[in-house]
């Protein structure tokens, strides 16, 4: 996911839209029996602020599929995560770095995916979990 700022400048632009389909490492999902469906979609806008700074904002769309943590049934959920990050060639401490007029969005997108990843994967917010059969004990009202 490389954005070439020189190419953007050649077109006489300081702002440009982008779209990438991306296949991150499987290790980003740490929930047992759940997988990230590929590709992840990344879209947004990059704006050149000055010689050393660019601002990127957009949205990451991804889906998870696997076993619900509560009821153990198969499930699929879609997510959309907004992001806004500054990139700097001047070595600013809080910004993502860029070199040779090229911005690599990979680390920023991976960081956002990790932040947005649920701790537990549930089929729906109303999932009641595993439904156990009613026992003889329960039928007697004891």
Image: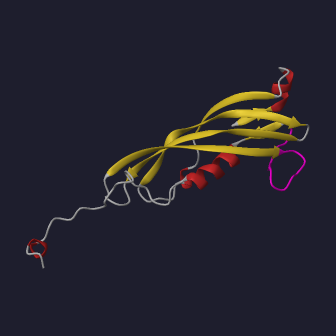
Quadrant in which the N terminus appears:
top right
Give me the residue at 67% from left, 34% from top: 44
Outermost residue toward the bottom in this view: 142
State the extent of the magenta-drawn residues as a range. Answer: 88-100
The answer to which image quadrant residue 32 occupies is: bottom left
Give me the residue at 62% from left, 43% from top: 82
Front residue (pair 23, 63):
63
Give me the residue at 37% from left, 55% from top: 68
Residue 6 position in % (x across, y down): 85, 29
Q: Is residue 42 left or right of residue 33?
A: right
Looking at the image, residue 13 lies above or below residue 41: above
Give me the residue at 86% from left, 25% from top: 9
The answer to which image quadrant residue 7 occupies is: top right
Quadrant in which the C terminus appears:
bottom left
Q: What type of secondary structure mainly makes up the magenta span?
A: loop
Q: Is residue 46 left or right of residue 142?
A: right
Residue 11 position in % (x across, y down): 83, 20
Q: Is residue 25 left or right of residue 101?
A: left
Q: Is residue 92 magenta?
A: yes
């Amino acid at each position: 996911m490389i954005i070439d700022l020189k190419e953007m400048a050649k077109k006489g632009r300081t702002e440009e839209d982008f779209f990438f389909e991306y296949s991150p490492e499987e290790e980003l999902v740490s929930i047992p029996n759940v997988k990230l469906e590929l590709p992840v979609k990344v879209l947004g806008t990059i704006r050149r602020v000055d010689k050393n700074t660019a601002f990127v904002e957009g949205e990451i769309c991804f889906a998870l599929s696997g076993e619900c943590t509560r009821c153990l049934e198969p499930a699929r959920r879609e997510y959309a995560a907004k992001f806004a990050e500054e990139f700097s060639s001047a070595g600013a401490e809080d910004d993502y770095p860029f070199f040779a007029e090229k911005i690599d969005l990979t680390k920023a997108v991976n960081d956002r995916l990790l932040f947005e990843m649920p701790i537990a994967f549930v089929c729906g917010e109303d999932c009641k979990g595993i439904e156990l059969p009613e026992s003889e004990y329960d039928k007697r009202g004891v």
